[in-house]
Image: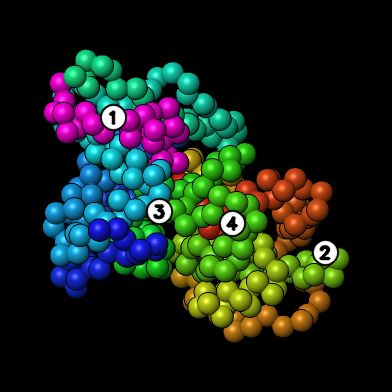
Amino acid sequence: MTAAPGAHVQIAHHEREPLRVAMHDVQRSVADYYAATAAGGDLGRPVRAFLVSAQTLNDLFSNAVADAATYKAILVSADQAEVDLVNAVKYARNVNQHVLHIIRPGDENLTLVGGTHGLRVYALWDDIPPQAHARLRKSTQALKPAYEAALQGQEVTGTMLELLRFYARIAPTIVHRDHRGEWSGFPLMSQPGMSSPLHPEEPRNVERALEWLSNRRPGGDVRLICGQFSIDGTPYLYGHTFVGRYSFAPWIDSAEQVNIDIGLGYVYLKGSLDGKLTDVSSRFPEARQGGVLMSHDELKSWATPIARIDDEDDWCGDTNVEIWERYVRLERSELTPAPMAYGLRRARRLNALVPPSARLV
């Protein structure tokens, strides 16, 4: 039996929540691993947690769901890279659980990037030594070519995201989401100068990724509008994105985009800033890409929702007019290199500047 292109595994009502919990474990392990790459600690623990949770999901689809036949058919007819990835994870998990060998990223060929905005390690999946492989059952040994093709020598976070994409594609209802409808654990925190995806849904092609960013609601709970600045006749709104009462990043979008967001159900607020915000950056040393602001009270107690942005002259409700103009020009100027402009827009649009220690969900 082979599955039709784009086939989905049918998930019964009673199966949905257990599978969501299992998927949440995988999502959480990916987020934990990525956070560890900036913490300077042991990367092996979250890698092993990923292998266990990912193989649990594979086992549930293979043996527990009523529509297991469709799942097995998908693994027959899917792209070879996807099949190899599922089997590679199974191989590495079996090594981890059945052989006295510690699975961890390799110590060689580590890439360390960053600077004043923090450092992050990009690690590769390590080789499995012959002596460990020799102790495995023959059925597991048969999976080693998949490990060599899909994981060995590959950057760890990227392969983890690929596995999440696979399961979201074949069973979209099992994705675990927070109260905003966002994938739990995502987006990953932006690393300046790095273009690798921060979200399982993020296209790898920049043009498609920009379209994706514009057609989804922004990250965070609400956006506070602080002013408007026009470039070549196009008005751009700017302000702060809030999660609860905290803002870790500014945002910049065209008035047209803001109206699209409002149409998608996202909340934009407007109100006087006088005495309402305090700089609390010292509380969040991991948030190195900008100041952290806190509202003394709930935002909706002093700012009101905006139903639509209409044409009006440029304005600024903040004393730091020059800083805001510089923010807008840096992201929107044609002189800004495309990769840099995309990185800024992605970080601000996804609100991907919130450090793991400050996740408020």
Task: Tell me, yes or no, if residue 12 can be seen here.
Answer: yes
Marks 4/2: CA distance? 23 Å
Residue 24: % across, % down: 28, 55
Quadrant housing the C terminus: bottom left
**Which residue is nearer to you in this view: 57 or 289?**
57
> Which residue has dot 3 on it?
165
Residue 302 is a magenta residue: no
Which mark is nearer the camera, 1 or 3?
Answer: 1
Residue 273: % across, % down: 62, 68
Marks 3/4: CA distance? 15 Å
Secondary structure at badge 1 equals helix
Q: Residue at position x 51%, y 55% from top?
A: 202
Q: Which of the numbered marks, if any, corresponds to residue 83?
A: none
Q: Quadrant of residue 130?
A: top left
Q: Reading the chain from its start, which is encountered first: label 1 or label 3?
A: 1
Label 2 packing within 10 angstroms: few (<14), some (14-19), many (20+): few
> Which residue has dot 4 on it?
209
> Which residue has dot 2 on it?
231
Q: Residue at position x 53%, y 67% from top?
A: 216
> Which residue has dot 1 on it?
144
| Amino acid type of the residue that numbered disc 3 sits on in the rendered structure | Arg
Which mark is nearer the camera, 2 or 3?
Answer: 3
Label 1 packing within 10 angstroms: few (<14), some (14-19), many (20+): many
Secondary structure at badge 3 equals helix
| Amino acid type of the residue that numbered disc 1 sits on in the rendered structure | Lys
Q: Give the dominant element type of the magenta stretch: helix, strand or loop.
A: helix
